[in-house]
Image: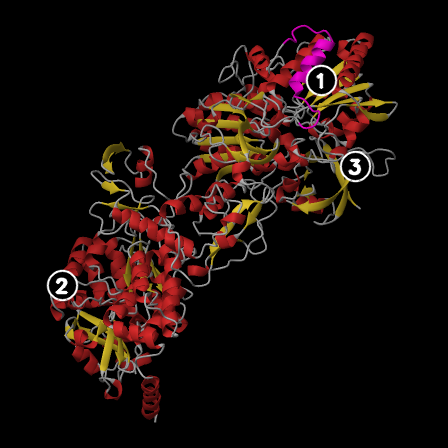
């Protein structure tokens, strides 16, 4: 600690911190533009010049380190004169088009110009004009307003990991631009809008739709991945018009992914695939809009009939992992009240062998913030950058600080993280490869490995990963993270138990990167089968008479979308509670109950670290839609199920959690199963990612996101050797089939036509075809053996 | 002609044969690489070597005049990777000494850099040569090949334990890459923009490693200093201004060119060596240290001696030693307009005051020169320069401000005349006569 004096106040600050940090610590604001606490120091805007005793000239507070006995004057004549001088320079070439600028009212330049600017300028020459740039469908540019602070440039280089923006030309002609002919394609691109201190970068979808002071602000929580980013929902006339990050250092820091920022457009979607705003029932094959009481009666009747005729077990409940805790809790209670144990929210999971053998609710295994403290990390089976962009961002920063990150996966997508080691193997080889790492770590630690793993030995790659893992400073800073791919894997339980062994050998931690907003909450809400109840896969493999679907689109959200569609279609009664409609839903459902998306209901998500985050509605329900917890509560009454007397979502939450804890209890990743290292598949194995902008029903309906680079149409990706083996060239149109089905197999629909694409990040004999997309849904299971032929 | 005149030649010893005298054998014949051999065979200690350089009071020849020995002593001893970088990005208008140094005697710079590498414990060196003199870059590369073949560069130089290799790097003609940290960024392959200091290059330099950067002439002087001893070198000049210095004399003199004279030589003597004023015209003003140094009027300049202290006392800077001589035919407003345009063009655009201020200055001076000036413009120019100076990462904003302030200070009446009469105080005919004479005299000389 050093002692310094700022404006006459003495304070203790950490050695090595800068004047601006010290001033911030005592609550003194120093005007600035280029400085941002999460970015490197540029010291180029010069707005933060302050007077330092004994320094001959004003010093930039953002870049000047404190020294013992230093005396700083932030408001002295010298300091203010320098700050005003800089403001004058900033404004001479600024267009001052505030009345038509989207940043007006929330502009750092505008705000500081009030304090440091003059009412008239002595600059009477023509102002600079800078051509606008096309940064893609999400970020609009007005580059004439740019003050060259380079925050956006530093963001792409440092936080997003790839310098997609740069400054070209020099002097007064300097311009911020992307690579020629390229757009900014990072999944974190929207953050440059927040960072831009002027109106040079604004939100393209939001552009010109409202002034900032017309918007109401509501706190909310992201319904997408397991992180649970904190949001500020901005609404006007009960429509969400913009979403901004709510800073929370423990979760999303000050960032949002583009998915979280722009998916709100789906909330306002219209048309055949848009929002469902009226209850509908199917009568004689015709859809009719009806009153709520009619629709609820109809639904209750249908479910009661099936339960009475075929027994409760003839009903299956498929709950979206993006549904709120309250919705899941009431849905499982309703189904159990009807005598059904067939309840599940783990729609994309295919291995349920750990059910009943778990010691608790699977979770991240640590706090989110603790990920950044790990110095040795192994990420197993994860499309990390697209599935968990902000966790990838945390690991990117730790790798820069010296943490060693290794990856074990079936696709070598560029994570924009400096990797220590990587093992890229076909999906069926994933368990064996992880077992090799366990063996190698055991050998290095000089302890005996699980004898069940002996037959796989340990190859060079496994040894390299193991060497990295054991070389850390201490075991507790070693982490093994299982991604979505590992959780969806047909041997997910084996991967779980191997990670558990690995963590135990290392004295470290392991956990799951939660796929969805309520991947932990689903367990807590008991939305999983017990006893001989059927899990998500089983209730679709052995079709039921009736299904209750809450918030999901099973044909896209399940591990085997084709199977889900078939089972729903054959069912006598499908009751759907959904904020959206779709053609598939109209085909298989008997009754559609319009329920609120997360923005129009109160509720809670339990994020991947077990944190309970409750939120209120940001807007009124659209049309006749109603919060799903209320709908389920009334359905429970109509079906005369016990325990449906709650009058608020908080009551439901408190009942589900036994109170309102900050973190849920019972988090535990350990399972008690024997590892199964038999490679199940043989042949051309499918590697199925869930593309970031197709992962849930909301984001699939967000038009701007659907135009982004990450929303490309799925292709059939193979490495060079696999392409050659199948006589293909990149760009060929190919027919991709489930193995065993011949191309002339009449009537069989398990085939799709795609374009072959070269992807040398894939292992041999792997064919990457994205899931969760209408174009590939017919292929069925995410993990399967495929065949491919040229058309 | 390579060498026109000199007093006490050191750096220019080898220039006599012009382009025929640059090669290794010529340099060795002049006693080249003897100092390197002496250091390596005697296993001279790094501290002794630096002490010798300190004794000479050699001050950086690039413009700032920082004592070289002191700079070398800042290098951390323990660091495993260090660099020596030579700044031949000679972009200052009026300066052309380093170009000739590398053209006529590249090996003195190479030897100086190797010795510097030995002194600071670096194993790698780079010479950054600016893009407009590509043939000099080629000459330097050829010299490097010779030195490498002769065992002066590479592993275990001359059988010693010391290894050092040196590479040439050519820029693409950005003035700002002459700023030492902008130069480092440029070598690293980034946009040439100065870094915020501290940290200084001695702690965080090329690729983040401790780095010593010196001007070409500084390195070239090293072998001579070690040859004659620091004390003797200092005594060539005057106290605190050791040795000899190259001056690039340009402008309205009869024989523009490079002149090596001891520090402290009167300006009048230098002017005489350069053949005196062209056409016998009257001296009006001199910029004594490259375009970013404040201009000095004739009477002040004639009283100066050519060394750091005397010029500083007169209110300017010795800078890189680029002496720009202007006679009575010069319109000072037009001269300033050209200078201001240069800085407007060459600002890197990083810091707000410089990015915006250089353009503002140029536009106002341009306006005055073109008969659209206003009474308040001189105050405006002074205010804008005041707001620029000392408020940026590097000194380019100051460099752009100095000429403006000094031109207005010393030649205010010309600016006022321009504003008032919408034309030049110096009759256009007189201005034309000035340039006409130049053409006539070159023709005579050629004949």
Which tag, 3 or 1, sits closer to the chain's start?
Answer: 1
Q: What residue does disc 3 label?
A: A751
Which numbered disc covers residue A317?
Answer: 1
Q: Residues within 10 Å of mark 3 (few under 14, many from 20)?
A: many
Residue A615: x and y, percent? 55, 23
Tell me if residue B80 is in the magenta stretch.
Answer: no
Measured in 3D between alpha carbons, the distance from the residue under mark 2 to the one under mark 1, in whole angstroms, is: 90 Å
Question: Badge 2 sits on which subunit?
Answer: B
Q: Any magenta on residue A633?
A: yes
- Give the quarter of the figure containing the N terminus of chain A: top left
Residues at marks 3 and 1, common chain? Answer: yes
Contact between marks 3 and 2 (CB within 8 A): the answer is no
Q: Position of residue B64 (x, y in %)?
A: 24, 61
| Residue B240 marker | 2
Given the image, what chain letter belongs to the residue carrying mark 1? A
Q: Is mark 1 on a helix, strand or loop?
A: strand
In which quarter of the view is residue A622 placed?
Answer: top right
């Amino acid at each position: 600690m050093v002692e310094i004096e700022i404006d006459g106040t003495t304070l203790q600050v950490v050695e090595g911190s800068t004047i601006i940090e010290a001033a911030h610590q005592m609550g003194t604001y120093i005007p600035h533009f280029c400085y941002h606490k999460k970015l490197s120091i540029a010291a180029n805007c010069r707005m933060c010049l302050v007077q330092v005793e004994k320094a001959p000239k004003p010093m930039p507070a953002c870049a000047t380190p404190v020294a013992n006995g230093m005396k700083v004057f932030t408001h002295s004549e010298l300091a203010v004169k320098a700050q005003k001088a800089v403001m004058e320079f900033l404004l001479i070439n600024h267009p001052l088009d505030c009345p038509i600028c989207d940043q007006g009212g929330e502009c750092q330049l505008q705000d500081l110009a009030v304090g440091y600017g003059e009412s008239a300028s002595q600059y009477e020459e023509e102002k600079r004009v800078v051509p606008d740039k096309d940064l893609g469908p999400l970020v609009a540019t007005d580059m004439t307003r740019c003050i060259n602070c380079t925050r956006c440039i530093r963001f792409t280089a440092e936080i997003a990991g790839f310098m997609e923006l740069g400054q070209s030309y020099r002097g007064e002609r300097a311009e911020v631009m992307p690579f020629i002919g390229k757009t900014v394609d990072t999944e974190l691109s929207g953050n440059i809008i927040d960072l831009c201190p002027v109106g040079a970068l604004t939100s393209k979808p939001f552009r010109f739709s409202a002034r900032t002071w017309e918007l109401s602000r509501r706190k909310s929580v992201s319904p997408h991945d397991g992180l649970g980013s904190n949001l500020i929902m901005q609404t006007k006339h009960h429509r969400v018009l913009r979403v901004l990050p709510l800073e929370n250092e423990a979760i999303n820091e000050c960032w949002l992914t583009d998915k979280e920022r722009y998916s709100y457009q789906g909330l306002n979607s219209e048309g055949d695939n848009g929002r469902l705003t009226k209850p509908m029932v199917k009568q004689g094959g015709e859809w009719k809009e009806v009153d709520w009481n009619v629709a609820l009666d109809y639904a209750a009747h249908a479910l009661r009939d099936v339960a009475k005729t075929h027994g409760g077990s003839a009903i299956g409940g498929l709950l979206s992992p993006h549904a709120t805790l309250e919705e899941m809790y009431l849905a499982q209670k309703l189904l159990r009240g009807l005598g059904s144990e067939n309840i599940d929210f783990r729609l994309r999971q295919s291995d349920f062998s750990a059910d009943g053998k778990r010691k608790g609710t699977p979770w991240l295994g640590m706090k989110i913030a603790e990920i950044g403290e790990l110095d040795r990390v192994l990420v197993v089976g994860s499309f990390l950058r697209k599935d968990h962009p902000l966790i990838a961002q945390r690991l990117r920063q730790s790798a820069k600080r010296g943490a060693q990150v290794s990856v074990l996966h079936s696709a070598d997508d560029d994570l924009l993280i400096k990797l220590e080691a990587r093992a890229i193997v076909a999906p069926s080889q994933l368990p064996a490869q992880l077992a090799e790492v366990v063996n190698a770590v055991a050998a290095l630690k000089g302890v005996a490995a699980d004898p069940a793993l002996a037959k796989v030995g340990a190859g060079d790659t496994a040894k390299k990963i193991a060497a990295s893992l054991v070389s850390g400073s201490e075991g507790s800073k070693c982490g093994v993270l299982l991604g979505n791919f590992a959780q969806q894997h047909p041997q997910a339980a084996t991967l779980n138990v191997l990670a558990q062994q690995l963590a135990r050998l290392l004295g470290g931690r392991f956990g799951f990167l939660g796929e969805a907003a309520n991947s932990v909450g689903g367990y807590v809400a008991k939305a999983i089968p017990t006893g001989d109840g059927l899990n998500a896969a089983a209730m679709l493999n052995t079709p039921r008479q009736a299904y209750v679907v809450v918030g999901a689109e099973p044909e896209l959200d399940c591990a085997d979308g084709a199977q889900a569609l078939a089972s729903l279609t054959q069912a006598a009664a499908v009751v759907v509670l959904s904020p959206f409609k779709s053609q598939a839903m109209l085909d298989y459902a008997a009754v559609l109950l319009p329920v609120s998306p997360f923005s129009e209901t109160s509720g809670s998500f339990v994020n991947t670290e077990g944190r309970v985050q409750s939120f209120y509605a940001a807007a009124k329900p659209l049309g006749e839609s109603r919060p799903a917890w209320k709908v389920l509560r009334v359905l429970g009454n109509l079906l005369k199920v016990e325990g449906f007397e709650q009058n608020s979502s908080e009551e439901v939450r408190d009942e589900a959690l036994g109170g309102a804890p900050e973190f849920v209890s019972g988090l535990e990743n350990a399972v008690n199963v024997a590892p199964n290292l038999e490679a199940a598949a043989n042949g051309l194995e499918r590697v199925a990612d869930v593309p970031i902008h197709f992962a849930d029903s909301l984001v699939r309906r967000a038009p701007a996101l659907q135009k982004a680079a990450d929303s490309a149409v799925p292709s059939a990706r193979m490495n060079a050797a696999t392409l050659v083996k199948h006589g293909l060239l990149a760009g060929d149109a190919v027919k991709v089939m489930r193995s065993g089905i011949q191309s002339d197999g009449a009537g069989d629909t398990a085939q799709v036509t795609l374009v072959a694409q070269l992807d040398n990040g894939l292992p041999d004999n792997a064919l990457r075809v994205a899931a969760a997309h209408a174009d590939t849904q017919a292929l069925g299971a995410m993990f399967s053996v495929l065949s491919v032929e040229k058309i | 002609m390579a060498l026109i005149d000199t007093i006490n030649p050191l750096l220019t010893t080898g220039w006599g044969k012009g382009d025929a005298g640059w090669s290794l054998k010529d340099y060795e014949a002049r006693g080249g690489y003897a100092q390197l051999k002496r250091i390596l065979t005697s296993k001279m200690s790094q501290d002794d070597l630096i002490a010798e350089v300190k004794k000479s009071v050699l001050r950086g020849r690039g413009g700032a005049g920082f004592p070289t020995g002191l700079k070398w002593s800042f290098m951390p001893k323990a660091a495993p990777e260090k660099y020596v970088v030579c700044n031949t990005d000679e972009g200052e208008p009026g300066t052309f000494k380093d170009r000739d140094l590398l053209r006529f005697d590249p090996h003195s710079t190479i030897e100086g850099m190797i010795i510097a590498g030995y002194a600071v414990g670096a194993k790698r060196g780079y010479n950054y040569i600016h893009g407009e003199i590509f043939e000099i870059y080629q000459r330097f590369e050829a010299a490097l090949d010779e030195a490498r073949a002769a065992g002066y560069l590479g592993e275990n130089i001359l059988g010693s334990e010391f290894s050092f290799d040196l590479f040439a790097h050519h820029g693409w003609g950005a003035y700002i890459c002459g700023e030492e940290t902008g130069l480092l960024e440029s070598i690293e392959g980034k946009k040439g923009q100065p870094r915020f200091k501290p940290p200084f290059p001695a702690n965080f330099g090329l690729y983040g490693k401790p780095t010593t950067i010196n001007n070409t002439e500084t390195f070239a002087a090293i072998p001579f200093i070690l040859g004659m001893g620091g004390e003797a070198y200092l005594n060539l000049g005057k106290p605190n201004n050791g040795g000899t210095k190259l001056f690039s004399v340009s402008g309205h003199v009869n024989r523009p060119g490079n002149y090596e004279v001891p520090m402290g030589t009167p300006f009048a003597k230098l002017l005489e060596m350069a053949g005196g004023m062209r056409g016998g015209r009257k001296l009006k003003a001199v910029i004594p240290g490259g375009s970013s140094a404040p201009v000095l009027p004739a009477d002040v300049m004639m009283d100066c001696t050519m060394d750091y202290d005397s010029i500083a006392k007169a209110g300017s800077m010795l800078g890189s030693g680029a002496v720009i001589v202007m006679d009575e035919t010069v319109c000072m407003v037009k001269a300033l307009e050209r200078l201001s345009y240069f800085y407007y063009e060459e600002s890197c655009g990083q810091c707000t005051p410089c990015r915006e201020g250089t353009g503002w200055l140029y536009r106002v001076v341009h306006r005055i020169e073109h008969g659209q000036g206003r009474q308040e413009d001189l105050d405006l120019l002074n205010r804008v320069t005041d707001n620029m100076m000392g408020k940026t990462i590097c000194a380019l904003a100051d460099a752009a401000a100095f000429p403006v302030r000094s031109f207005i200070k010393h030649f205010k009446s010309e600016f006022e005349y321009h504003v008032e009469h919408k034309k030049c105080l110096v009759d256009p005919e007189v201005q034309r006569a000035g340039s006409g004479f130049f053409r006539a005299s070159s023709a005579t000389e050629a004949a």
